[in-house]
Image (cartoon, rainbow, N blue to C red):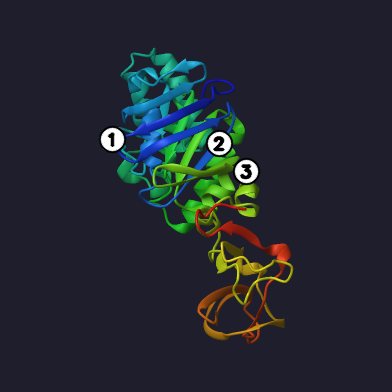
Amino acid sequence: MTEGGSGLRLEDVHARHGVHGVGLQVGSDELLAVLGPSGAGKTTLLRTVAGLERVTRGRIYIGDRDVTNLRPGLRNVSMVFQSYALFAHLSVAENIAFGLIVKDVAKAEVKRRTLRAADAIGCAHLLDRRPAQLSGGERQRVALARALVREPDVFLLDEPMSNLDLELRVETRAEIKALHARVGGTMVHVTHDQTEALVLGDRIAVMRDGLVEQIGTPEDIWRTPQTTFVARFVGSPAMNLLPGDGPLRPAGIYPEPAWLIGIRPEAVVLGGEGVDGLVERVDVVGEDAYVYVRVGEHLVCARVPSRGKPSGRVTVSVADAHLFDAATGRRV
């Protein structure tokens, strides 16, 4: 990456395939995680930055350069795709160096940058192998090294761990975080995995239907979700959303039909002086149990220790409540 990074700025960016007015800024040494479900426009957004998707309205800046209408090769952007896209007939070293070779970079410089990138990613011992001789995790490292070797101003990662099993995802996540700590630069990492976003991102942009619902630090996104979509999408199990004038209204909140009250499952207390309900289901996940209690028309999820028999009496505290406008879904 270019020393210190360059930063990235999008101003009211629209694209034909699912981006409808995105504005955001990524710092010169920041890793922004773009989080959202399938169809949210995450990959299209990355492709507009890379120049692979045409912007129909708005501007894109890398550093001080307006790159909105520049060809991909002139943007100095590297992208890692969901598929590794390695050339089967080339060695790992040749795959990593391919972008430099086609640009006629001097052989000595190609070798220097290839070894540097391979060392940074931890795949220098694989340089003589072919892709068919590599595991999925090793192929992903090669794809990362191939992107890094170009020393880009912006490094784009499009769900690079989606093809890996859980153990390798955890390992690769740690490698990406360590890589960014070592080399810095501007990174945008797209994912549908909330844990990945919360662990990796200096900040997170949550997308839905081509728009950014909220941008903030992982703590901001978790503690003060600005919409009901963010509140339910980030968190497992999802946040409970209850009517403002319903039986589970916390003491201290006055009846308000126009509100929704959000309570995270870990903030729901079973027992005490709460409202009686009927336990419909208990899902045990290691040390935790997700207890689903029917209270009137509403199913409430509580996250509690898995030991013992759960009570059907539900108590919620005003200190743990998030209030949203029922009509707009926005925080009040």
Q: CA distance from mark 1 to mark 2?
A: 28 Å
**Residue on which disc 3 sits:** 217
Nearest-to-viewer mark from 1 and 2: 2
Question: SS class of the residue under badge 2?
Answer: strand
Front residue of this view, candidates 100 and 126: 100
| Residue 58, visible in the rendered structure | yes
Residue type, label 3: Thr
**Residue on which disc 1 sits:** 87
Q: Residue drawn at (55%, 23%), measured in percent from left and top?
A: 5
Drawn side of residue 62 relative to residue 306, left or right? left
Dot placed on the residue nearer the N-terminal end, 1 or 2 = 2
Q: Quadrant of residue 27?
A: top right
Front residue of this view, candidates 292 and 299: 299
What label does residue 31 carry, if any?
A: 2
Looking at the picture, how far across and down is residue 184, in whole percent?
Answer: 58, 29
Residue type, label 2: Leu
Dot placed on the residue nearer the N-terminal end, 3 or 1 = 1
Q: Residue drawn at (36%, 38%), measured in percent from left and top?
A: 44
Placement of 324 over or under 92, stated as above or below = below
Placement of 68 over or under 135, stated as above or below = above
Q: Residue drawn at (50%, 57%), measured in percent from left and top?
A: 327
